[in-house]
Amino acid sequence: MTALLLAAACTGGDWVPSPSGALFVHYTLCSVQNPCTPEVVITTRNGAELRRFEIRNDEGVPCASILDVHWASEDIIGAECHGNPSLSYYYEVSITTGKALHEYLGYRFVRSPDLANVAHVGWIIHFAPPWVQSEYLQVGNTIIYPLPPGMKPVEQKLLEMAPEVVTQKGLVYAGAHEFRSRFVWAPDSHKVGLVDCLVDYRLRDDSPDAFEEHGKPENERCFAVAVGLDGTFQRTPLPVASSRDAVLGWTDAHTLRVTYGGTGVQVRVQ
């Protein structure tokens, strides 16, 4: 462990143990003063380095900035790489070969307790009106929430837009989703909890300038939501003023508790 502590000066985050505790993963830091390509480092419990490798996409382009690493199994890591302020790349990588097995686009990646899945906000256009940037929840490459009425979870094709849930009526774009909490997995890894706020945007007129101004937000409403992997969900209203400070946690596999301002609500799901 002494070797781990000495190495921490040039690496990022914590040394993360594998599920068995036999291995640790870390990543190197790069900067203007220390130009390099960041690498993932795998060590034994006593600090002996087993291997190191760069995170590369299918085209062989290396990740220039690693944001986080953790374990997806005893021999696979999850690594988040920075893309731009509204996009990260998440790779599941074999520690034996260094090869990326899966790639997901988006941000706020959270691995499930059983390590089998990763929840995240899906890819959105970086510079766009807020109703175009309406957020949606993916598990891996599958969009599970929100979906148009009657639609089942659907695979997100590379760089395709998600199914449209925002509706336009005259000058109003209604129902843009903004997630205001981190994702919290249920202990059975079958459901995800979050705080979701819907906002409408009203343009002042139908001119191009009004469109570029992105309109005025109105009719904001917020909910605690529990979403199943099959796309079914339950939600309970939350005060808008408490939406950014609410604390989420599962009391059991079927009860999401949301606490705010000294009080709280529960969302029960099957």
Image (cartoon, helix red, strand yellow):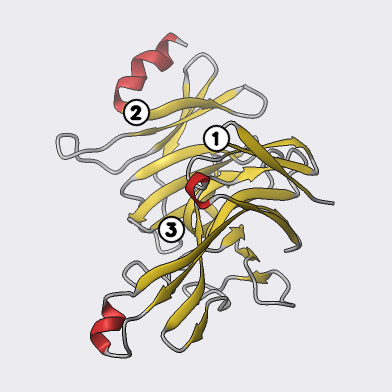
Q: Residue at x 44, y 81 (%)?
A: 172
Q: Position of residue 192 (x, y in %)?
A: 67, 49
Q: Nearer the viewer, mark 3 or mark 2?
A: 2
Q: Quadrant of residue 146?
A: bottom right
Closest to the observer, 248 or 154? 248
> Dot 3 surroundings within 10 Å: few (below 14), some, or many (20 or more)?
some
Quickly name the residue at label 2.
11
Residue nearest the viewer, comparing 48 with 260? 260
Label 1 environment density (alpha carbons within 10 Å; few <14, some 14–19, many ≥20): few
- Work out whether 241 lies above or below 198: above
In the image, what residue type sits under mark 2?
Thr
What is the CA distance from the residue labelled 1 to the residue labelled 3? 44 Å
Indicate the secondary structure of the residue bearing disc 3.
Answer: loop
Write the residue at 64% across / 64% down: 145
In the picture of the structure, the residue carrying the numbered disc 3 is 57
Whether label 1 touches label 3, CB < 8 Å: no
At label 2, counting other C-alpha atoms closer than 10 Å, the crowd grade (few under 14, some 14-19, many 20 or more) is: some
The kind of residue on which mark 3 rests is Asn
Report which residue position mark 1 lands on.
261
Which residue sits furthest top?
A: 2
